[in-house]
Image (tube, helix red, strand yellow):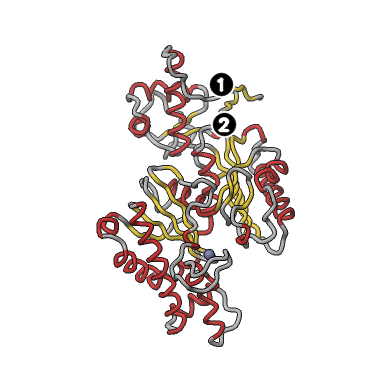
Amino acid sequence: MRPDRVPRITPAESGHGTLEALRESNRSRVINALREHGAISRAEISRKTHLSRSTVSTVVRDLTATNIVVEVGPRDGAGQKARGGRPGVPVALSESAGYALGIDVGHRMLRVAVCDLGHRIVAERAEPLAGLGPKDTLDFAARLARTCLEQAHVPDDRVVGVAMSLPAPIDAETGTIGAPYLMPGWADVAVGAEISERLGMPVRVDNDANMCTLAEAFWGAGRGCDDLVYVKAGAGIGCGLMIAGRLHRGASGTAGEIGHTTVIQDGRLCKCGNRGCLETVASAEAITGPLGRAGQPDIGLPAAIEMAMSGDRGARRVVEDAAAAIGVALANLCNILNPSRIVIGGELTQAEQLLFDPLRSAVRRSAIQAATDAVDLVPAQLGERAEVLGALALVLSDSHQFMLTAPNRA
Ligand SMILES: [Zn+2]
């Protein structure tokens, strides 16, 4: 069974106004809504696309007839084919509409996931990543991606897009890492070109905080929120900014480097070359360093948090001080961006109230009242899978690269 190509989806050209152009435009609006929101009802499609219910019903009926869209829900998989378009039953893009591939290269783990355009994960793998240089890391990532595609029986021509997360800002123009001190050895690696060549497919590369922001906005604690800040607090501190529903990357891709905003004018020297950055008082190293000097050599962040949670006064103090410093940086951000939600993720969230209480009170103390009244501070929901899920979300949210193919019905 060879897949038939259906036309590339593009917005109807302005000025045409023909019936065919209108039909094509309606069709892409419905497909884009489904790609972005997964399984939703016809009524929800109508709300999200501003198309009338009857137009949505007609488009969905046509897409169902060609197997691009399927009804999902309790009856799905039970062999019952729904007919006639019951308005409350969710519909989604079918497996045959295509797949997204997501890769997360972290400091310690490599994760790969494949999902269909109906948001169903069809393969996911995680492997420890330690001591490899950039070339070997990218080889490993490409191999694991191949394994996942094979495991899910997804041929290359069914992959509509690939995205990869890296724990550093990416310069969109050069495809290289915009802050090389964050990933020593990677400075001159054209990451995007290298991984694309290994996979034989174009790959979008973006930083981990942006990916987590997208993932939390799609499936986690940021759902339904258009003005969202995601903060990742762990080894370093970075954030992703969603403004009016769109990720804000900045002129060279470094937007959201909150860890390198100055919190102490003449403070300690930071690895970025500046003094007194947030990371000099609130990164994992800044928290564990003083504990090491106090007779706890080589202690990691999880152990430091555990000490703090079990009542060790010194550990508790450094965690709370770090939380307060992050709160001050976020208060400044609240004054500038006025987000309605701040989602906090990363390893430091294991400190629970020891993190959230001082952080919330620092935000309340330092930001203007209207900004603090508007904002909710909530823990992230997607944990260590957030980056790889965000890579999938980046593909699902990117309509420009989208090509839809549908197999013939047998
Ligand atoms: Zn710095």
Give the quadrant of the N terminus.
top right
Does label 1 or label 2 sit earlier along the sequence? Answer: 1
Mark 1 or mark 2: which is in front?
Answer: 1
| Residue 161 visible (yes or no) | yes
Relative side of 34 to 150, left or right: left
Residue 113 makes an appearance in the image: no
Q: Residue furthest front?
A: 266
User: What percent of the width, then of the height, locates residue 5?
Assistant: 60, 22
Circle 2: element type: helix
Q: Position of residue 245 (x, y in %)?
A: 40, 42
Q: Residue at x 65, y 32 (%)?
A: 157
Mark linked to residue 96? 2
Q: Amino acid at mark 1?
A: Pro
What residue would you read off at disc 1? 7
Q: Would you say 326 lies left or right of 107 here?
A: left
Name the kind of residue labelled 2 in the image: Ser
Looking at the image, is 115 positioned above or below residue 184?
A: above
* Mark 2 Cα shell of 10 Å, populated few (<14), some (14-19), many (≥20): many
160 horizontally vs 259: left or right: right
The correct choice, above or below, for 317 with respect to 81 in the image is: below
Place of residue 401 in the rendered image (x, y in percent of width and height, measured from the top left): 56, 33
